[in-house]
Image (cartoon, rainbow, N blue to C red):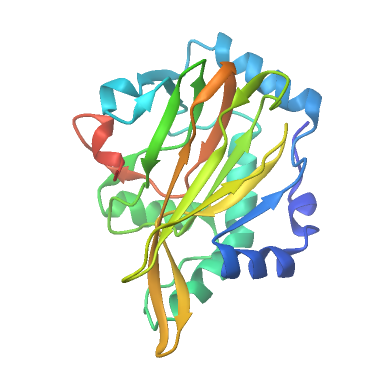
Amino acid sequence: MTLSADTFEKLDWRAIAAQLDGEGYAVLPRLAGADEARRLAREAGASSALRRVSLDSLDLGRGDLLYFGAALPPPWAQWRTNLYRQLAPIANRWNEMPGMPYRFPETLDAFLERNRRAGQTQAQSHLNQLGADDYLALHQRSEGEHVFPLQVVALLTAPGKDFTGGELVLTEQRPRMQSRPTVVPLGLGDAAIIATAQRPFKGSSGYYRVNLRHAVSRVRSGERIGVELSFHDAPRAADDQHAFVP
């Protein structure tokens, strides 16, 4: 089932924006139905069209990333287009808070055209496939002149049934403070909007930007399949390592 633009518009974006402001993430429960999520996971494992990259080869953990390329298959292209339209106003407000002049256009196509003009043509959206003892190390995707401050991750297999472990972990680093870790609870078909690399935070002297990274903890058993949708492309590089910032 492909979610319509109207489905995304009917989400409680006021509450979502408030959680993003306060925590740097917001969970969208059951954005994909259980049957749909499992179907997408099966298709990922059987697809020969996805480009498989080992996390070990990138020094970013164990397991595999399966890159979609520039043309995302259904339903991910629709998800990305419709979510961008709702998230662009939040991203612009995040830039307004600390006084940053950059503003994001209303549509994903217009934003990706900015990416292309700046030499950002390496697609970053992918599935991640993690088996027992696999993990995804802390990282962020913040390379390039045009970086969208939000991205979306979703879970396509069921924790406690298809796998154990494999929690989504976020860390936030504020100046002169220890990193704050957060485990984001995701169930089958849940999605989470997370900060890509930085978000505004109001301190005693006004707004400043805090640094964020995310990871997937070690899978203890079974297989965990998730998806990560990026709204910006990376600068073209000789390999994928340049798209990551550990």
Which x, y percent locates residue 170? Answer: 49, 49
Which x, y percent locates residue 60? Answer: 33, 31
The mark tally for this picture is: 0
**In the image, residue 131 above or below residue 179:** above
Identify the residue at image location x=62%, y=47%: 192
Q: Quadrant of the N terminus?
A: top right
Identify the residue at image location x=46%, y=18%: 133
Which x, y percent locates residue 168? Answer: 55, 40
Question: In the figure, is residue 21 to the left or right of 199?
Answer: right
- Residue ranking furthest to the front: 178
**In the image, residue 101 above or below residue 157:** below
Which x, y percent locates residue 205? Answer: 40, 90
Quarter of the image for residue 187 reads top right
**In the image, residue 104 above or below residue 26:** below
**In the image, residue 99 above or below residue 128:** below
Quarter of the image for residue 51 reads top left
